Image (cartoon, helix red, strand yellow):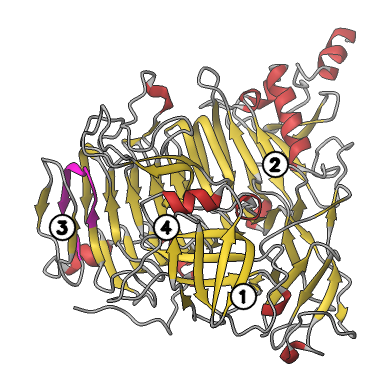
């Protein structure tokens, strides 16, 4: 009897009194408490987490834990001790509520499940569960005194609050949400309006603009410039502002000043025919001149906000994002994380701070340049015609997955995020992303695969000696991606770099600033890691909201065995400031695209771009003549169409027609 009691205490013996199917609940010392579920014929261990819980509890339904991290720790201990109760898996059931994160939730190799015993984090009874990287901003009151620079029209209408602190440090941030609706960081041009630069001086690394209507911009600390250039935007921190008559000269901080002036693609656009690059200035008290705008004064540690009609800051939930990444699933190449599932979880409120710290000059699809310049003598060993070189960094994502397999996200929501939503970065395979919502995201919705590591010149073909690095056999289907790339306009709906055997099927992508679904990287016809990708029965509409040189479906580089079939592409927005108003396409096969079959895709006209394609591309039956059966079958399938109620379409934006 004493031996049995000892084994029970260590969590290594199931009580012989169990007559109903057993579910194990562990406490902090590894003890298993019996818990029963009628009609459940499998052994599954259950843990419970509640906003009213306590991490000193045992994790039972009656005594739930308080945090995701403690539940994961307990599950990790069960696996370490080979607890027999987990034979058929561990389910971490989350009661409804908002769970505040102070650091990213980290899923390690020790947390890996198995095919027979996965770990599942899921909302209890499909109720609302949110993992939040934001902090509450409270204590709002109307600004009663005048402050330098506040526009006259804002006097008496602006509210103020103390800026939040995290860990005793003032929080710097670039987004603010009022009851889930993103506010506008104060800018000199309101609505959809932008101005146009007069010139760019690459040698001096300066830009000339028309003198802003704002009376005094002598205090430029923290002020930024967003500049629109071809297929990407750049965020530049302003160092100086000098007025010369009806013009003003801007200089910028390093490193973005040099990168923006030296990199050739995409450079600021200068054209008498179509107009120079558009821009706006942001982040100054002088620009706070309409409802919905806000400004953070880092010196006085105060936030100013002009409420929209109907907003009551006494009761509103005002959220500033604190964390850049909420969840990291990260193994190693030899010890990956496997069989870990998220179901019914919302991932909300993540920021991205590089533009405030180092500026951001992207190359394409949001990948920012670390260094880039034009070659005085063109040509490299791999590409004799190459006339520039570039090295890129990768923006953070709210949820990042690396060196993992059989990871699943189902019925989750990725919302109110500054950068990428979900990113499978490297060394992943056989994962599934199904039935999720990606909405109100500053960058790309879903991203998969290596693009170029920081030490790897971005035009080189990526072909690692260890193929375990390649993201392989990923399955992305029946997701809604809407209102994304709403800050970094050069990002896309679904983006894949060097991937192998990826399946992107039955997704709907709409209201995107640039391209819809992009597959490929490298601008090369040479052999690389890509092959056998399948882009099937997706629906892409209402894209190219701000940027052209665009395609609903876009490819780069050689990818043998790849098929793009049965997709529906329609409704390209009339972007207000494109470098070339006619440079929009339904399909865009960019440089090096080779060995790809494009078949049975519906679009209202066969307006396509084939830029320096390689051999082996096959085009069969694409355009408005494709059968209505194929057209109607594209997009989200019946079990997941409840997502469509979240679909965003900007109805005041006009649509292009041939």
Per the image, is 596 magenta?
A: yes
Residue identified by numbered label 3: 600
Residue 281, by quadrant, is bottom right
The tag earlier along the polypeptide, 1 or 4, is 1
- Quadrant housing the C terminus: bottom left
Residue 126 drawn above or below residue 499: below
User: Disc 1 on helix, strand or loop?
Assistant: loop
- Alpha carbon separation for disc pair 3 and 2: 43 Å
Residue identified by numbered label 4: 493
Residue at image x 21%, y 67%? Answer: 603
Pair 3/4: label in front? 4
Pair 1/4: label in front? 1
Mark 3–mark 4 contact, CB under 8 Å? no
User: Disc 2 on helix, strand or loop?
Assistant: loop
Pair 3/2: label in front? 2
The residue at the far front in this view is 244
The circle drawn on residue 104 is: 2
- Residue 365 in the image, given as x and y percentages of width and height: 42, 52
- Res. 644 in view: yes
The tag earlier along the polypeptide, 3 or 4, is 4
User: Disc 3 on helix, strand or loop?
Assistant: loop
Residue identified by numbered label 1: 187
- Alpha carbon separation for disc pair 1 and 2: 31 Å
- Quadrant housing the N terminus: top right
């Amino acid at each position: 009897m004493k031996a049995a009691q000892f084994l029970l205490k260590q969590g290594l013996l199931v009580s012989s009194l169990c007559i109903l199917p057993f579910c194990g609940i562990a406490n902090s010392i590894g003890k298993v408490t019996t818990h029963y579920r009628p009609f459940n014929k499998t052994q599954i261990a259950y843990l419970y987490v509640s906003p009213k819980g306590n991490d000193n509890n045992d994790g039972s339904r009656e005594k739930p834990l308080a945090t995701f991290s403690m539940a994961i720790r307990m599950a990790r201990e069960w696996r370490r001790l080979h607890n027999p109760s987990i034979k058929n898996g561990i389910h971490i059931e989350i009661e409804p509520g908002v769970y505040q994160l102070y650091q990213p939730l980290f899923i390690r190799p020790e947390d890996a499940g198995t095919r027979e015993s996965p770990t599942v984090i899921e909302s209890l009874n499909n109720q609302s569960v949110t993992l939040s990287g934001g902090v509450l901003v409270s204590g709002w009151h109307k600004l009663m005194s005048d402050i330098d620079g506040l526009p006259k029209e804002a006097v008496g209408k602006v509210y103020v609050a103390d800026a939040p602190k995290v860990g005793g440090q003032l929080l710097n941030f670039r987004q603010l949400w009022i009851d889930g609706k993103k506010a506008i960081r104060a800018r000199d041009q309101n609505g959809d309006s932008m101005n146009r630069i007069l010139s760019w001086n690459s040698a001096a690394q300066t830009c000339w603009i028309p003198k802003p209507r704002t009376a005094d911009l002598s205090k430029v600390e923290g002020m930024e410039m967003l500049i629109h250039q071809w297929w990407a935007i750049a965020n530049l921190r302003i160092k100086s502002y000098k007025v010369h008559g009806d013009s003003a000269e801007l200089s910028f901080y390093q490193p973005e000043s040099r990168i923006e002036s030296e990199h050739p693609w995409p450079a600021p656009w200068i054209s008498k025919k179509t107009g120079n690059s558009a821009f706006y200035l942001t982040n100054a008290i002088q620009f706070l001149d309409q409802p919905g705008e806000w400004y953070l004064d880092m010196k006085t540690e105060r936030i100013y906000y002009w409420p929209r009609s109907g907003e009551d800051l006494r009761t509103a939930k005002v959220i500033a994002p604190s964390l850049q990444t909420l969840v990291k699933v990260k193994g190693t190449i030899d010890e990956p994380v496997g069989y870990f599932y998220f179901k019914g979880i919302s991932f909300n409120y993540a920021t991205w701070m590089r533009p405030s710290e180092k500026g951001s000059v992207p190359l394409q699809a949001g990948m920012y340049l670390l260094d880039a310049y034009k070659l005085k003598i063109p040509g490299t060993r791999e590409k004799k015609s190459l006339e520039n070189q570039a090295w890129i960094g990768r923006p953070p994502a709210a949820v990042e997955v690396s060196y993992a397999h059989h990871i699943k996200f189902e019925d989750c929501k990725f919302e109110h995020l500054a950068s990428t939503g979900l990113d499978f970065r490297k060394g992943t395979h056989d994962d599934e992303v199904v039935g999720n919502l990606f909405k109100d995201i500053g960058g790309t919705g879903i991203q998969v695969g290596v693009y170029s590591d920081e030490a790897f010149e971005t035009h080189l073909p990526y072909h690692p000696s260890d193929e375990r690095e390649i993201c392989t056999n990923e399955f992305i289907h029946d997701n809604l991606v809407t209102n994304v790339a709403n800050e970094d306009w050069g990002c896309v709906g679904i983006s894949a770099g060097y991937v192998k055997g990826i399946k992107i099927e039955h997704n709907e992508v709409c209201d995107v600033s640039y391209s819809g679904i992009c597959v490929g990287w490298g601008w090369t016809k040479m052999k690389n890691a890509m092959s056998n990708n399948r882009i099937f029965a997706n629906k892409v509409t209402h894209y190219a909201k701000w940027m052209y040189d665009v395609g609903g479906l876009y490819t780069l580089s050689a990818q043998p065995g790849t098929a793009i079939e049965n997709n529906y592409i329609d409704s390209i927005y009339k972007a207000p400031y494109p470098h070339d108003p006619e440079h929009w396409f339904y399909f865009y096969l960019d440089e090096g695209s080779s060995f790809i079959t494009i078949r049975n895709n519906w679009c209202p006209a066969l307006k396509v771009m084939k830029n320096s394609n390689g051999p082996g591309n096959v085009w069969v039956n694409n355009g408005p003549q494709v059968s209505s059966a194929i057209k109607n079958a594209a997009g989200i399938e019946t079990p997941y169409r409840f997502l469509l109620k979240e679909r965003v379409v900007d109805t005041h934006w006009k649509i292009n027609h041939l």
